Amino acid sequence: MGKTTKVVDLEKVVIKFAGDSGDGMQLTGSQFTDTSALLGNDLATFPDFPAEIRAPQGTVAGVSGFQIHIGRIDINTPGDIADVLVAMNPAALKANKNWIKKGGTIIVNIDSFTKKDLEKAGYEASPLDDTSFEGFNIIQAPITKLTREALKDSSLDGKSVGRSKNMFALGIVYWMFNRPMEQTEKFLQNKFAKNPELVAANIKVMHAGYNFADTIEALPSSYTVLSAKLKAGTYRNVMGNQAIAWGFLAAAERANKGLFLGSYPITPASDILHELAKHKNLGVKTFQAEDEIAGICAAIGASFTGSLAITTTSGPGFALKAEALGLAVMTELPLVVVDVQRGGPSTGLPTKTEQSDLMQALYGRNGESPVIVLASSTPANCFDWAYMASKITLEHNTPVVLLSDGYLGNGAEPWRIKSIEDMSSIKPLLAAEGEEYQPYARDKKTLARKLALPGTKGLEHRLGGLEKEDITGNVSYDPENHEKMSSIRAEKIKRIAELIPEQEVFGRKQGDVLAVGWGGTHGSLYSAVDNLQKEGKSISLCQFNYINPLPKNTADILNNYKTIVVCELNSGQFANYLRINFQGTIFNQYNKIQGFPFTTSELEAHFKSLLKK
Amino acid sequence: MEHLTNKDFTSDQEVRWCPGCGDYTILRAMQKALPQLEKRKEDFVFISGIGCSSRFPYYMNTYGFHTIHGRAPALATGVKLANPNLSVWQITGDGDALAIGGNHFIHALRRNIDINILLFNNEIYGLTKGQFSPTSQKGIKTKSNPHGTTDEPFSISDLSIGAQGSFFARSVDTNPKLMQQLFIEAEGYRGTSLIEILQNCVIFNDKTFASITAKEVKQDAQLFLEDGKPMIFGAEGNKGIVLNGFKLEAVKIGENGITEKDILVHDAKEEDPTLHTMLARMRPPEFPVALGIIRKVSRPTFNSGMLAQLEYEKQNAKFKTVDELLKSGETWEVEG
């Protein structure tokens, strides 16, 4: 205290908290996020954790990380590599050694660098003692010891004392970035309201960490990141999965519909179920079914009965829902299937991100079975796309697949709060009592059929998975009718292209390189293209949210660039989809299948190589 | 309330089951039972999966949904939860409910969702032309096991009781009056009502229930259980069921000192399922088959529990609109 500390103003900074999966790193990271958001920073986060709840302690496989990128400039990604790493043990240091900026600051819990800890991480000797981290600013903090010391008068048991050491780390980082601790204090008071002893202990440890950082001379300076220049309005932090849940709530209220979710727990989609299950006060009915199939089937039943019906899942669950989704296609019922994609095939990488369910969404059903496919592209716009999926499905009475991914679902960013009034209206297509009803008569413009809800007098009718006769909806095995109905189902989807907005391009409308992306890669692609544009390079970005149908001006856009490169986190599914739709156009590919998002730097490097050609 | 007749429930679709199929009598019994329920026609919904029985909704002039194989309980659950005022009927068969749809079947029973399940048990696959089903008798020779099955069949009643099913009834397809009565009882019961109908498939498993339904044996082979009444059966009304130690025994009144007082009295409302299980398992030649309502115990339904929670939360929640939710929690202002 009382020392003069240099305060350095930073434009942006990337901080990573890493530790054992039981070390509370997700909580530490999200606390730093919330505090930074309240200070007005723009930000993006990326939690990265193992699939196991408690993976083997101290091993590299068991490392759980939380990366946050804060800035006073526009932030679009959680950052490629960290400026500051908090490593609670040797495994956390090892797992992140290639993801820390040369010369960056590493705060280690030196108490967990014992021989045993080092062995578990696969180190023969401490990497802090050799040249492994030469040039880095290493802060060796005795976090375990000082946490115990701070709580020596506490009546808490040893285990609880040990657990609170993440608060010590948080305290250090709060000091480093000049953050107030009130928000976290408030959070702790709420979280442990029933256990005041625990609240006091955690707050005490956090302050101990803060004071430790203030005291030691190893920290050369304290940094500050000023508020970002965001558009005026009321903001909050939002995670992708939460935003999807809220988008559905908003759509149901706007459409004056009951909201029904049929779902089965699956990583990384379960948080949508958790979020909606909290809001029974808003009339939401959530049904945790016995399996994925029952989840979608219950939703179809609720849709038939007049609800805005949703089912949420990830890749393996989506595969199980395929047959039922075909039923919704055949019966032309509104339904939104949310697939929060993860690494596949099979169980794959449950907690890692990927974009490899695109073909499954487009074609993964028996028969000719077209569905509308949309993709959200930032954690916050998950709200808008859930809303749009609901609007389209209710107005066209045909199922919609909404693709998100683990990176968006668990990622967070500030969101300018919208009001229901700001959203476009939703007009469900329903038959009314007394009208002449034919279940498969259609709107001339959209080809959508009207629903007649059970309980409506005089409109009794039967639906089913067997082919329908045009107009009447009676079972029909007639060959010409089947061909006609198949083309109607396809045409109905195509016509939606007439109603959706034209595709936009970031950058000039023609030039050397067009980077094409879809869904969750927006942040990294945007940052890379933005950086290169600032260097004067001729490159633009076209990021798709409407996948099927594609916006009607897509071909016009593609024809204006010398080189097109389709960037996606799979082996080229969207590129192949574009090849089917735009034969003759050459699509280059840039792909990554590592369970991680693109880094801005790898994209920039690749685009530069294309620009040189 | 408009008075309805069986004609009001008959759709304009031609019925396409095989001539002589047991399904016809079940359909007619349903069309006669529904007008007796004093409900609005538009409030009935029939939901089925796949199989011969699952064509049923097409022949009912109500709201109907012919869904996919095995999944009707899940669809029906969604319908009932979305609009609890509807009277929801699931029509299924032994393959649809117990093979491909076994999981949904047991979970519907466990939850006690307020729907009525009619399980047409013909112990065979009809629509796929004659393969054995999960209720086929062991050893039966079919196309898919020409050397005789080695599968042990399910006992539907045991499965139901094991899944916490609280309403189990049984009929034969040759008894339209009993079917009508059971359909009406099922609709009146709050919870999952399961009715097993022993149904003859004339093409692939003809006369499989002949030892129960044939004219010359049926009076001795069928026991009509009625709540509070002694379990008496037989052409001469002099046979009954007694409990001998831990086992049931079919006896003759007047023989070996047995009097009518020794005969068990049926209690469908008994919570302990032991006796219900034993009664439902009875089979000729040693025993008659138990028909009627075997088990009917009161238990809260899933749908009423969900609605009560919704109501409570609506009354007690901090916010009532989505706008209030979006603005709740930590927010901050950015000035223009």
Image (cartoon, rainbow, N blue to C red):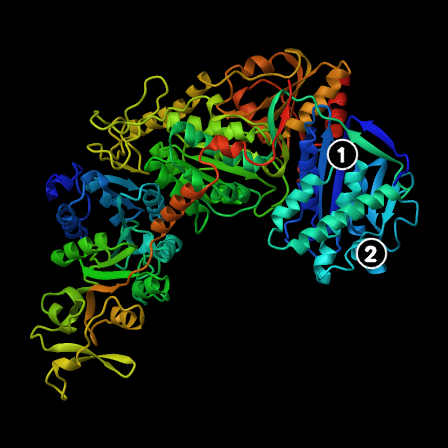
Question: Disc 1 designates what residue?
Answer: A14
| The N terminus of chain A - image quarter | top right
Q: Quadrant of the C terminus of chain A?
A: top right
Residue A167 appears in the rendering: yes
Q: Position of residue A204 (x, y in %)?
A: 75, 50
- Disc 1 on helix, strand or loop? strand
Residue A557 in picture, x, y percent from top left? 59, 14
Locate residue A7 relative to residue B139 in the image: left or right.
right
Specify the quadrant of the image occupied by residue B98. Answer: bottom left
Marked residue chain, label 2: A
Is residue A372 shown to the viewer in this render? Answer: no
Seen at 77% across and 60% down, the residue is A153
Task: Say which of A155 and B336 sits in front.
Answer: A155
Choose between B84 and B103: the one closer to the eye: B84
Residue depicted at 61% across the width and 28% down the height: A235
Reading the image, the residue beneath label 2 is A145
Given the current orientation, which residue lies at the most extreme left position? B236
Instruction: Name which residue type carries label 2.
Output: Lys
Q: Residues within 10 Å of mark 1 (few under 14, many from 20)?
A: many
SS for tag 2?
Answer: helix
Amino acid identity at mark 1: Val
Nearest to viewer (mark 1 / mark 2): 2
Q: CA distance from mark 1 to mark 2?
A: 27 Å
